[in-house]
Image (cartoon, rainbow, N blue to C red):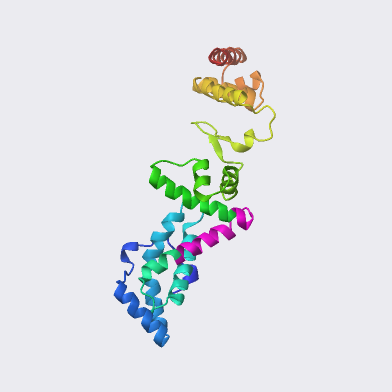
Amino acid sequence: MAYQKVVIAGLDTSKLTVLTEEEKMQLLREMQQNGSAEAREKLILGNLRLVLSVIQRFTGRGEDADDLFQIGVIGLMKAISNFDLSKDVRFSTYCVPMIAGELRRHLRDFHAVKVSRSMRDTAYKALQAREKLTASLNREPTAGEIAAEIGAETCDVVTALESISDPVSLYEPVYSDSGDPLYLIDQIGDPDSTSSSWMSELALRDALQSLSDREKNILRRRFWQGKTQVEVAQEVGISQAQVSRIEKAAIGKIKEQL
């Protein structure tokens, strides 16, 4: 089995082997006492469902599920190698934090935007505190409540959480209807991009939607394609005078709505 090339897509988790705790301990003894590679492989295969359950906590952060699964398997393999049979602890109890820790290290050290280790540590403490407070308060906690929980300044918590947020594409849609979407890049670096100008553009789009297909066709050719009334008349098969009347009526409708 190629452990570095695990693929989740299409994986039927119901068919994964699930070992009992007694079976895990027996395989661990075989591996540690006899160096059995077969026992090690059975342990890994028999705990893949445990890896899947742990990575559910780390989804929704922009990371590829296949990558998270592979990192989780690395954590599982480390747990198998380091488990102490003399300790009175269940293997699953020991394994889960090992898998989770490997995933946290990966997310901390390989984030797209590099930030200081101290800020990353603050961010992950804040994430853990947020999960704990959400469960106890039955609501999303405020930044101040999270800061109080971990003994940090509110501004530091906000900065730390923002530092590990996934970068947003400049081509992220910020508004979309049946027409062309508005992208974030359309609103950045434009001195005229105020809330009022944005709303005016949306209002204009709504007004255009109220026009007939014929009116939209005329306006598109005239103002988007830059054609003359004569050229439009020849293309759509009507007179220049008709094009002029349709254009004027359509513009009047738009002005009335705005």
Q: Is residue 115 above or below residue 82?
A: above
Q: Residue at x 39, y 47 (%)?
A: 135
Looking at the image, which is closer to me, 190 or 136? 136
Q: Is residue 202 visible?
A: yes
Q: Quadrant of the C terminus?
A: top right
Q: Is residue 36 visible?
A: no
Residue 59 on the magenta segment: no
Q: Residue at x 34, y 62 (%)?
A: 13
Q: Quadrant of the N terminus?
A: bottom left
Looking at the image, which is closer to me, 208 or 176? 176
Q: Is residue 37 above or below residue 97?
A: below
85 left or right of 129?
left
Looking at the image, which is closer to me, 225 or 111? 111
Residue 114 on the magenta segment: yes
* Main secondary structure along the magenta-highlighted residues: helix
Question: Residue at the bottom extreme?
Answer: 34
> Total of numbered circles in the picture?
0
Looking at the image, which is closer to me, 133 or 64? 133
Q: x, y percentage for residue 50?
A: 38, 64
Q: x, y percentage for residue 84?
A: 42, 77
Q: x, y percentage for residue 140?
A: 44, 41
What's the magenta region? 98-119
131 left or right of 245?
left
Q: x, y percentage for residue 243?
A: 59, 16
Q: Quadrant of residue 223?
A: top right
Q: Residue at x 46, y 62 (%)?
A: 100
Q: Residue at x 33, y 80 (%)?
A: 26
Q: Is residue 219 above or below residue 115?
A: above
